Image (cartoon, helix red, strand yellow):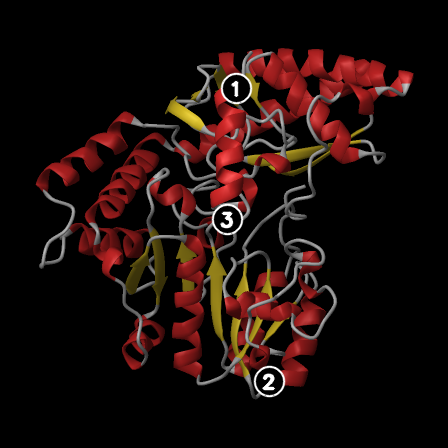
Amino acid sequence: MKFDKSKAIQERARKRIPGMTQLLSKRPDRFSQGVWPAYYDKSKGCEVWDLDGNHYQDMSISGIGACILGYADPDVDAAVTEAIRKGVASSLNCPEEVELAELLCELHPWADMARFTRSGGEAMAVAVRIARAHTGRDVVAFCGYHGWQDWYLAANLGTENALGEHLISGLKPKGVPKALTGTALPFRFNHLEELQAIADTHGDSLGVIVIEPIRSTRPDPGFFEGIRAIADKTGAVLVIDEISAGFRFCCGGSHLELFDQTPDMAVFSKAMGNGYPISAIIGTEKVMQSAQDTFISSTNWTERTGFAAALATIRKHRELDVHHRLGELGRAVMEGWKKAADKHGLAIRIEGLDPFPHFDLGTKDPLILKALFVQLMLEQGFLASNLYYAMFAHSDENVKQYIQAVDVAFGIIAKAIDAGNYASMITGEPAMAGFGRLA
């Protein structure tokens, strides 16, 4: 394989774009700088072609979980093409936004209204703004990863590492107003006592409780019920962040289908538009009408293609029960990882849930071993990392070929560990630490 064009554009990006990319999780140093191609020319189904013409099967991050159906899905793209043909913008509003609001409320009968943005981070900021407007209180208690905005990064103001459990250890909140100190307080998943302690201390100022419904583990019995009870007692608005989990375990939000929980608001993004930019905030009429008491507005939130993509994605997801297939794929991949590791005597820790599992190889030099795995898989024609986001476009044959390549890579890694020369085998840089919730 040649990577001349890929390396050249990375150097151009380094000079012109702070951090090289717009998304931390797509930076080449999260895989192996100098090896990972970073930029693509074309994608279709689960196939990707880089700028040098190298062809891969993508069994890695699937657009960071956004492309749940697969790249360039023909049905979604047809809906978007039709939206473009009819005009994506006008002095009037497109009817698709009303259709999407109705569809989301149909999928979630507890919800009455919806607002829309283009990305998950800004959707969470909108949700928190509406919730604060409704309660008139500043403090947000949260559990999970909820984006990059000031309300969330404020958790690290005046502390050493409050976000270490949720994001990246040691993240600096530079640029976040110091006046927000003490307004964002984390609690750990399945540790209801930590939320209770926040409520006991900040009950009169606790306005919002934000939680991811599921991540690497399932909630303990009584965890969600306890959160709902604390929200009701304190008067806080309960917001469930479905940006990562949504549409992976059911057609809609896992909070309702898996756990029968009723929040006051829920937020969706990523998979809802199969890669097109669209996000939704849904909620009860009582809470959502508080959006009228503050200022939330943006021109491009009315653009047509995101709504068209979401409608097509959800309808196809619903018709084909896409989430069942995602679970099957993830279970097959996890089984393949384990069998290959056992065959070669590799210590492996497999965690996560069926649609998006991940693994670690041993405890010594995990970032070097990750880079070596990435490199060995690229050499066999696979975009791969130590995590897997299932796409509906992945076939049984894709999984079979992927696991065969994993077997080869694990065999080489096992021999390198025994010989003690694995560090010298990587041609790029060791992987950098990323999101602890995924690593």
Q: What distance separates the C-alpha of mark 2 from that of mark 1?
A: 58 Å
Closer to the N terminus: mark 3 or mark 1? 1
Please name the residue shown 14% across and 35% down the image. 82
**Vertical side of 246 occupied by 152: above or below:** below
User: Within 10 angstroms of label 1, few (less than 14), some, or many (20 or more) residues?
Assistant: few
Q: Which residue is mark 1?
A: 4
Task: Look at discs 2 and 1 and give the one toward the viewer.
Answer: 1
Residue 203 badge = 2
Residue that mark 3 sits on: 258
> Where does the image place residue 217, in percent across and percent down from the top left?
65, 47
Query: Residue 103 placed where, x, y %?
Result: 26, 51
- Asked if residue 318 can be seen in this view, the reply is yes
Q: Is residue 265 left or right of residue 29?
A: left
Which amino acid, mark 1? Asp
Residue type of the residue flagged with mark 2:
Gly
The circle drawn on residue 217 is none
Mark 2 or mark 3: whose residue is earlier in sequence: 2
Q: Is residue 346 visible?
A: no
